[in-house]
Image (cartoon, rainbow, N blue to C red):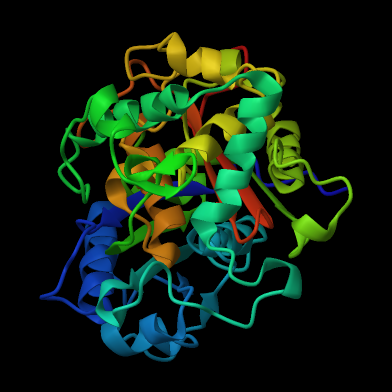
Amino acid sequence: MAKGIKDKVAIIGTGVTKFGEIWEKDEEDLLVEAVYEACDNAHVDLQKDVEAVWVGTQYPFSGMSGGAFSEPLKCFGKPVTRCENFCATGMDSVKNAAYAVAAGIHDIVLACGVEKLLDMGSKGLPGLADPHPLSVGMSTPSMFAICANRAFKEWGWTEEDLARVAVKNHRHGAKHPKAHFRKEIDIQTAMNAPTIAYPLKLYDCCAMSDGAAAVILTRPEIAKDLVGSGNYVTIKAIGHAVHSLNPFSRPDFTGLSFPANRSSSKAAYAEAGVTNPRKELDFGIVHDCFSVNELLTYQDLGLCDHGEAADLIREGITSIDGEFPVNPDGGLKCFGHPIGATGVRMIVELTRQILGRAEGYQVKDAKAGFAHNLGGPFTTSMVTIAGTPDWEPGG
């Protein structure tokens, strides 16, 4: 097996738009804004310095082919690749860009993502294709509601435990200037909200949003010349796994754990040399599309044993002032989820936290952390670990 990309790729520039109902801008406007912020941050010229681009969009109406990037940025003649991988679309664009740098194919590259959902007028996420016969009529909230009900039965979790996730993330996101929803809520507000798919209520579900994000990647030795020591982070690992598109047809499906999460995190931890993520890393950013998914992710990614995630949220361990902060930015609960942009935005947040430049809440003494996506019907999962150039687990 190849040795991986640990410390072969540096993130030197980040850009992100405000997420939300952005009626006055289209997808091209959003992408231009994020890309030029990242370029300015990295001290690079898009036309002269950036050699290749990966752009993530989930939906054709947000952009097709490499032209989704080259046309709005008027950046012609360069290799540009469009990525799509369900909710991991944005992070997959970062992965492919990072691999190109690590392989020595390019010196400076750009990864970005954008989605413009709210102009579509659909109820919930627009459909992509005909569903599998076993899941006809199943909404995304109902998929995760099945998991929540099973967790209630198996482990005694409660609606209040789910509400605590929403309260925590809204507390964090209220401080972030780029978040869609910047308002704290209390337990009673969360628990008394309308039911979407029992037991998931309004505040257990993330919203749709518009937004874009971008990062500039290069080799560490080039990073030192462009931005100087202390102004970049290095990627320690990227784990990625894809499992069944039809999990409900599998006899081993329980709804209590997702194989893609376990496989991607195992790969990422092995590459980074992490054996105890809760002790060796400083924080995490997880795919809280639904509050129960944040709890299940704690377990799948090894922050606690299975059945124990509710204890972490009850005891405040994953709060900004807890032992292991999770979603210090407010997560998808506060940003919403413009599919192609989300994974890139998570990498932006990961980078800024490690550099001590987070917008909103800053994790104290953050040296390394992870970002996680789960997409589709629990199908595709990615875990990216980043840290200061000199960080080593246990060091």
Horizontal side of 193 relative to 295 (left or right) equals left
* Viewer-side residue, 14 vs 248: 248
Percent from the top left, x then y, of residue 96? 60, 64
Can the viewer see residue 351?
A: yes
Q: Is residue 320 above or below residue 291?
A: above
Q: Residue at x 54, y 21 (%)?
A: 281
Percent from the top left, x then y, of residue 106? 55, 67
Q: Quadrant of residue 341?
A: bottom left
Can the viewer see residue 8?
A: no
Q: Residue at x 86, y 55 (%)?
A: 250
* Viewer-side residue, 200 vs 289: 200
Horizontal side of 312 relative to 48 (left or right) equals right
Q: Quadrant of residue 184?
A: top left
Q: Number of labelled discs? A: 0
Q: Residue at x 53, y 64 (%)?
A: 89
Q: Is residue 257 above or below residue 69?
A: above
| Quadrant (top left/top right/bottom left/bottom right) for the C terminus | top right
Q: Is residue 192 above or below residue 314?
A: below
Q: Quadrant of residue 268?
A: top right
Percent from the top left, x then y, of residue 73? 28, 82
Horizontal side of 250 relative to 270 (left or right) equals right
Percent from the top left, x then y, of residue 1? 88, 48
Q: Residue furthest left?
A: 24
Q: Residue at x 50, y 53 (%)?
A: 141
Horizontal side of 62 relative to 18 (left or right) equals right
